[in-house]
Image (spheres, rainbow, N blue to C red):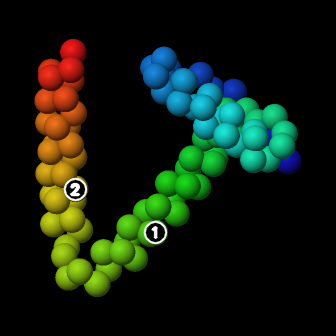
Amino acid sequence: MELMQSTTITISGKTRKELLRVAGVLQQRRGKKVDYEDVIQYLLQKGGRDEKLLRSAVLHTGWTSEEIRDVLRQGRAEDRRGEEELERRYT
């Protein structure tokens, strides 16, 4: 068992709620209580797998990392504009 040091981090209420939601899902899957350490480890592992998946998906496109990053930024900006438009329309 690894000796852990205690650290305090500041997170938003929204992030805390999301961590609790993920904790609930993990707890249900594992059938035992989980803590923030378990949730963060799970998310870090999941993030690593997604990065590998992304790399394998774009490996044969012939695009450079810079080009892929630019396209992702543009797509995120479009998504953000679309969300803002929906908020304006329905609030």
Q: Quadrant of residue 40?
A: top right
**Earlier-in-chain disc, 2 versus 1:** 1
Q: Position of residue 71 (x, y in %)?
A: 16, 59
Q: Position of residue 57 (x, y in %)?
A: 36, 75
User: Is residue 6 rendered to the left or right of residue 54?
Assistant: right
Q: Is residue 17 above or below residue 61?
A: above
Q: Quadrant of residue 54?
A: bottom left
For label 1, the SS is helix
Q: Dot 1 corresponds to which residue?
A: 52
Q: Dot 2 corresponds to which residue?
A: 72
Q: Which of 75 and 66 lies nearest the eye of the viewer?
A: 75
| Residue beneath the point at 84% across and 43% down | 31
| Residue beneath the point at 21% across and 43% down | 79
For label 2, the SS is helix
Q: Is residue 48 above or below residue 88?
A: below
User: Is residue 66 rendered to the left or right of residue 25?
Assistant: left
Q: Is residue 66 visible?
A: no
Q: Which of 63 and 25 lies nearest the eye of the viewer?
A: 25
Give, as a three-letter code, the residue at label 1: Lys
| Residue beneath the point at 69% across and 34% down | 24
Q: Residue furthest front?
A: 90
Q: Position of residue 55 (x, y in %)?
A: 37, 72
Q: Residues within 10 Å of mark 2 (few under 14, many from 20)?
A: few
| Residue beneath the point at 28% across and 84% down | 60
Q: Position of residue 3 (x, y in %)?
A: 80, 40
Q: Residues within 10 Å of mark 1 (few under 14, many from 20)?
A: few
User: Is residue 79 rendered to the left or right of residue 12?
Assistant: left
Q: Is residue 54 visible?
A: yes
Q: Quadrant of residue 5?
A: top right
User: Label 2, label 1: how many angstroms apart (C-alpha)?
Assistant: 16 Å
Give, as a three-letter code, the residue at label 2: Leu
